Amino acid sequence: MSWAARAPPASYSHSPQVVGTAYTPVQIRMGFGQQPPTQAQYAYTPPANPSSHPTLPMTSGSTMSSSSEQQSQQQKFDWPDSVRSYVQRSFQTSNLDPHVTRAEMEDKLKDTIRQTQDSGTMYTTDWDNMPLPQTIIKNERQQALMQSLGQSTNYSSMAEATASAVTNLNINPKKRKSSDLSVPEQTNDVATMPWRSAAKGASFGDRVNKTSMSGPVPVKSKFQKNLEKRQRRGDGGYQSTYRSPSPAPPTGPIVGLNQSLEKRYLRLTAAPKPADVRPEHILHQTLDLLKKKWRKDANYNYICDQFKSLRQDLTVQRIRNNFTVSVYEIHARIALEKGDLGEYNQCQTQLRALYKAGLQGHPVEFKAYRILYFIHTSNRTALNDALADLTTAEKEERPIKHALNVRSALALGNYHRFFQLFLDVPNMGAYLMDMFVKRERLAALATICKSFKPEVKLRFITEELSFDSDPEAVQFIMDNNGRDLLQEREGYVVFLSGKAGTLFETARSEAFRRVDLKGQI
């Protein structure tokens, strides 16, 4: 048998045979949320007559073509990590806004990502600083609200505001500054926001802001008209742009030039002028004049006004010497005599500072007044502080020693000792004790009603409570609803103490509850 007569194997035959295709086309499985490929992108046409084609083995070229199609399909849905982080931040609980629904957020999120995808800027966009969809929606609502109020907003200004919102997402768009009331100039350079779709066309705000400079002047709002009216009213009918230069502040104390001895007190509303202030030698003459007028006329309203003016001139000229101490001491004594605790406390406060500065005066007298005043106001804390400031030598001085004895008698409930001290008060301390002697008499009467029953002579009450006479004691009892507690005997009047306990105990409690703290130091 020759080699020519042998039939060649079927695998080496070059004649066309009816065989199947090398691969079976299978549609790619779609993931959730992915769009199926279009026919134009993944077109495949199977042979019309598979049996008429020869067997075509899989070549390396066809393998590379299939892998490239699968890679392109995978790249179409491969989002950058920054986009994924941006979406996650949008739906975090801390970033959610109750005024923006989830559907609105999803629509805005799709529009924003689709625009960057269409423009090819998805990988170059700074997603970490991109405003969240709820922030964009709120900005658009604010813009629409401002347009509805008749305030035309420049689109470029809106873009700058949005850019600032990118760097600081906590800005409240509802807060407005005074500069926002003016209408900005219209420009032709309109900036396009990166997340606004160009396919939707220009918004109503864009069409309004694209008006030419030659167009009609926008109508002013009612708020702006009212604002201009107030400005014209304050400027006397016109708005002046000139402002007089403010004078330079003085570098030191002024020296008065006024030669008047009497001057009304006026509260300062501006820097004092030397022409309105009296120098120190004139103030010495003024003090002598006021002391003479007080002894002659005793017109407290006039004297108080003149002393306040005198003290003001000393203050603005920064005069702090022994003359200043004497002015405050005299005014404090006059105020005590008239029961003006407000002016007394002002003088007492200044005197305390002047005494600490080492100036000469009467510190022992006014320290005793200070103790009695704190007894009157029942200010135990301030009283303890005043006692702690006393030196051993000062405690031996008669005014201070008397004030300490008054405090001790009241602390022990010794009304007999208290009213003995009330009759022997040094200096002008009696005016301060007159302010709280009434309540101490009520307390003493409440104690007498508990100790002496069923009755006590009226003369005993007059002497124990330091009344000037029996009629004064009777008037005091009657003023406290004790008319029925007085009865006449043969040659004397008695006080029914056994029936008055509840009455005077209630009056005592009410008297200690109300304390006048006017001008408290």
Image (cartoon, rainbow, N blue to C red):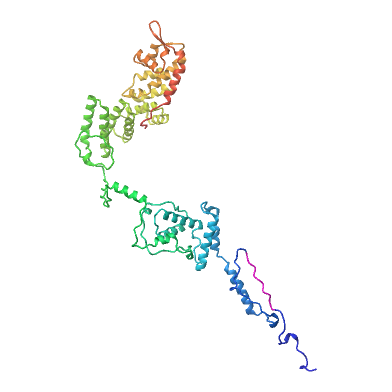
104 displayed left or right of 409: right
Position of residue 31 relative to residue 380, above or below, is below
- Residue shown at the point (34%, 48%) measured from the top left: 226
Total marks shown come to: 0
Quarter-of-image position of residue 165: bottom left
In front of the other: 85 or 428: 85
Position of residue 226 relative to residue 338, above or below, is below
**Residue 343 within the magenta-colored segment of the rendering:** no
Provide the major secondary structure of the magenta segment: loop
In front of the other: 396 or 487: 487
Which quadrant, please, contains the N terminus? bottom right
Position of residue 277 relative to residue 459, above or below, is below
Quarter-of-image position of residue 338: top left
- Residue farthest to the left, as pictured: 259
- Residue farthest to the right, as pictured: 1
- What is the x, y in percent for residue 112? 51, 62
- What is the x, y in percent for residue 277? 23, 38
85 displayed left or right of 499: right
Extent of the magenta region:
21-31
Question: Would you say residue 297 is visible in this rendering?
Answer: yes
- Residue shown at the point (37%, 18%) measured from the top left: 420
281 displayed left or right of 380: left
Which quadrant, please, contains the C terminus? top left
